[in-house]
Image (cartoon, rainbow, N blue to C red):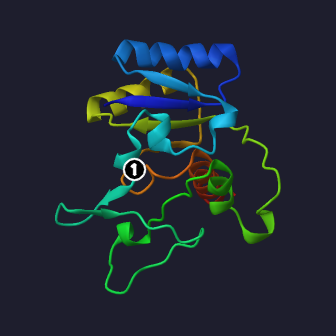
Amino acid sequence: MAKVLLFNFQEEQRRKKVKAVLFRLGIPSREVAPEEQNRRIGELAGMPAEMLETVSRPGGHTEPLKHHGGQKKRDPGETGPAAELHSPAENPADQAADCLPQEEIGKEQAPFQEEMIVMLGLNARQFHGFLDGIRTAGVRVPLKAMATEHNIAWTARELHRELAAEHASMNP
């Protein structure tokens, strides 16, 4: 299921250019509204909730995602990146609190304003075609990510926070 999620493409010309590239490649897209930023990436892409409640583990088996009150913890004996996953809370208000520093919990959170692109299920041809296409169209979007087993259950806000921090550290 290839799909691209578009966040905050307010400028019509930029949005049209990105959507034209996606159309040429036959990739469906979804424009995500600011009020949906506390929803999980997989949900926004149309994945059933039960698919987001398990995570692929080495060896091909699955195991439930664990909720740890916003703290990423390892259970004894767990190894690898999947061991650090946590599941967002069921209540959307709690989901926002899940990814916030302790001093921010309970405060009203404004939606993030930066453009962000999340790509799901693209094959190599689609992936490179999309990136080449938007570059050729003159659309630069610093916050881009592929959905993975490690971030598919994150909220858009959590993924944005990670991408923004990564971008800031690489572009001081």
**Count of marks placed on residues:** 1
Location of residue 133 with respect to 142 vertically, above or below: above
For the view shown, which residue lies furthest in the bottom direction?
76
Secondary structure of the residue carrying numbered label 1:
helix
Q: From this viewpoint, which residue is outermost toward the right?
A: 107
The extreme front residue here reads: 91
Residue 21, horizontal then vertical, whole percent: 45, 17
Q: In the image, what residue occupies the spot 74% across and 41% down?
A: 111
Whether residue 35 is visible: yes
- Left or right: 36 as drawn, with respect to 55: right
- Taking the image as shown, residue 57 lies to the left or right of residue 133, namely left
Q: Quadrant of residue 98?
A: bottom right
Q: Residue 59 appears in which quarter of the rendering?
A: bottom left
Q: Position of residue 41 (x, y in %)?
A: 49, 43
- Relative height, residue 47 to residue 170 (above, below): above
Q: Quadrant of residue 70?
A: bottom right
Looking at the rendered image, the quarter that the C terminus falls into is bottom right
Q: Position of residue 10 (x, y in %)?
A: 70, 22
**Is residue 99 among the parts visible in the rendering?**
no
Residue 18's place in the image compared with 121, above or below, is: above
Residue at x 44%, y 34% (from the top left corner): 45
Residue 29: percent from left, percent from top? 46, 23
According to the picture, the residue beneath numbered tag 1 turns out to be 52
Comparing 153 with 169, the one in front is: 153
Residue reaching furthest left?
Answer: 59
Which residue is painted at 18% across and 60% down in the image? Answer: 60
Identify the residue shown where x is 41% and y is 13%.
23
Q: Is residue 128 above or below residue 102?
A: above
Identify which amino acid the numbered label 1 is placed on: Leu
- For mark 1, does the 10 Å Cα neighbourhood hold few (<14), some (14 to 19), or many (20 or more) residues? many
Location of the N terminus (image quadrant)? top left
